[in-house]
Amino acid sequence: SVEASIPEPQRAAWKKFATQPFSNVEDFERDVVRHVETTLARSIFNCDETAAYAAASLAFRDRLITEWNRTQQRQTIVDGKRVYYLSLEFLMGRALDNAMLNVGLKGVAKEGLSDLGFRIEDVIEQEHDAALGNGGLGRLAACFLDSLASLNYPAWGYGLRYRYGIFKQEIIDGYQVEVPDYWLDFNPWEFPRHDIVVDIQFHGTTKKYQDENGKQVTVWEGGEIVRAVAYDVPIPGFDTPSTNNLRLWSSKAASGEFDFQKFNSGDYESSVADQQRAETISAVLYPNDNLDRGKELRLKQQYFWVAASLYDIVRRFKKTKRAWNQFSDQVAIQLNDTHPTLAIVELQRILVDLEGLEWDEAWAIVSKTFGYTNHTVLPEALEKWSVPLFQSLLPRHLQIIYEINLYFLQSVERKFPNDRELLARISVIEESQPKMIRMAYLAIVGSHKVNGVAELHSDLIRSTIFKDFVKIFGPDKFTNVTNGITPRRWLHQANPRLSELIASKTGGLGYLKDLTVLGEIEKYADDKEFKKEWQEIKYANKVRLAKHIKATTGVTVNPSALFDIQVKRIHEYKRQQMNIFGVIHRYLTIKSMTPEERKAVAPRVSVFGGKAAPGYWMAKTIIHLINSVGKVINSDPEIGDLLKVIFLEDYNVSKAEIIIPASDVSEHISTAGTEASGTSNMKFVLNGGLIIGTCDGANIEITREIGENNIFLFGNLAEDVEDLRHAHNYGEHTLDPDLARVFEAIKDGMFGDAGAFGALTGAIEDHGDYYLVSDDFHSYVQTQALVDEAYRNQDEWLTKCITSVARMGFFSSDRCINEYAESIWNIEPLDTST
Ligand code: F58
């Protein structure tokens, strides 16, 4: 047991004074006041909401850290296999609300804070989002951490502690402006571990020589050293004592404050510069989603994080005193996309160069340890690194990659003799000018499993970008694990009233641990009372969003209108341009009606939100168009409540928690075959909104689960996309007539300077319409009309919503994590009763 690990003579004293985390209102208040008066050095006279947030967080942090310690001890004692989730992004959002709910003490905190003079909602609002990610991939990692802890898996996350998270978005005169997100001013949720440091090497040269036994050894020497310092973030599970660890690495100069030799020799400026250069590595999150730019600093970030994490993992393994061939029985490492692929190379280097294993022996261990998750088929997002850049930064790793590739190509040559084209296609090294390292291929070669994130996506990677590898390794290496979301944050936290209603009909909050229990509410899909309550909750959520819209944009929207929401990163493949063209079409249609005809129009609020990568000009133009259209429509007196267009600034996790529960319909309208999965589609349906979407990503599985009567699907299928594109390129492209009317309005200057939007219309009219906006437009507009019609019948609409929620059990990230654990990691949950 955990306790037995304390030496007998000291046990009594440790036990007597062991921290007793609060569990009632009185003890919570005592902890909060103590933190205000001591940790924060304030008093009742100057305790504002910020201080109340700080003190409440510190009180919960104390609780988490005691459980965190126990969890780590339990893992050490059990000494079983652990999983390490390597991700460059963890889009965590706020921690306080989540911690209160997961440990089941939000009620206690609410009462305690109220006694001390604060409203819990205001206190929660003080927290700055931890926004260390771009979008879906980063948020998925955060949901996974919640599920891993909630299911008691022995798991660690490893990432980078960026000083600046994803930029804050301001909308000025309709344009996106980026503002740095310095979020670390006060962060009670991290523990600096100044004793856990790893020195990381860059550049330098390699030397080969024979050791005393005549064995060839390679050393990597010289170059530059940067120090990695660990910061630990406790991750509480829901309704369990398990509290896992997210370890984030921060960079600093290896020589401490600055280089004293340089300082003493009068070179003060350059010693400071060295330090700043080192700190630059973990300074900022790259803000691109689904685009690879191949910047040197990004490669430095990747190696820095991977090398520090592997050092930590290997050190922990070595403490168990096991033989190396047991490594993969103790360690599973999951690569969240290709960003941590260097871990494969680094582990091989550690085993061969530092631990003296034979190449084959080492490779057998390495290739049993890793799993690789692919999140995209978009060619521009597949990572490649230039060989010259790599050679300069990581000379030894380049040699190892060449060697891995050589053995791989030899094995393929043996299996498929005389197929030079095959070898060229699958080589980890692309023979371009300059040569490039294909990271996805390296990840496949070095992993024992490769998975996509939704069925269609996994089928697509098997039949397109990784086709040759399926032939080489066989189909079993490639698998699907459909994404999921944590119902704790995305239902219980974001939509407390709906959660309460569901709990009241399913026997409590147990459904949050087994989401299939939601099935029990299907019997109320026609229950008058239940539907009334359901509708009231949706309305209240819409009122909450309407208030937010008013406060942030000044526009008044009618909560009785149909709320149609598209929030996600702005990208041409996600087709926000199609949505706004549809809005313009709606506007033109209403304008052409008589006042009498207008009485029959169903009022709508079109809400957009999302960031554009700072260098993605087309995406920024889409934002500009949405705002320009909104400006005209929202102030058109003929339109009034019939149509409003809102762009919500700075979409992030905490705003998503307000936005998602307020949707009637949400849009997931990517060109078929481009959105690997999507996860907000799951969040919207789970919150009782219907979706309009293409046959893409997880929309397909959502349809399978909830039934096709409960979703608005439209557009061309993935299997037809290639032919359509081909046809466009041979001049067979006539613009959809409705879309043509929309373009005319834009070009007439109805939404301001027409020249500003020329690139958007041009991409469709003149440049091949790669994302098939015109091909899908008619079907989209028709399906939107079906949405209007369906919404008119509120009774049937509510039945659809309730039925859909009841059938969403499959999309819990708990199901998803259990699949990874069983089919990829081979790990078991820990018993927490000791
Ligand atoms: C997203 N990818 C997919 N990448 O687009 C989405 O369909 C899927 O649901 C989600 O992953 C989770 O599987 C994504 O968010 C990025 O943002 C990367 C950031 C780093 C550069 C490359 C893109």
Image (cartoon, rainbow, N blue to C red):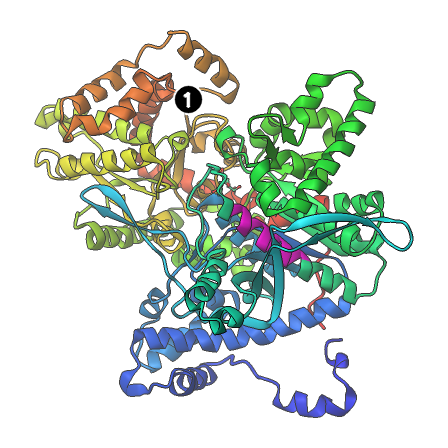
Q: Is residue 586 visible?
A: no
The image quarter in which residue 56 lies: bottom left
In this view, the residue in front, 575 or 396, is 396
Secondary structure under badge 1? loop
Q: Residue at x 29, y 20 (%)?
A: 762
Q: Amino acid at mark 1?
A: Gly
Reply above or below: 666 against 511.
above
Which residues make up the magenta segment?
A: 298-310
The image quarter in which residue 69 lies: bottom right
Residue 235, given in percent of the width and then of the height, sits at 55, 64
Which secondary structure type mostly characterizes the magenta part of the structure? helix
Image-based side of 285 in relation to 538, left or right: right
According to the image, label 1 marks what residue?
A: 715
In this view, the residue in front, 538 or 487, is 487
Residue 359, given in percent of the width and then of the height, sits at 82, 44
Q: Residue at x 73, y 29 (%)?
A: 475
Assign the N terminus to one quadrant of the image.
bottom right
Residue 61, given in percent of the width and then of the height, sits at 50, 74
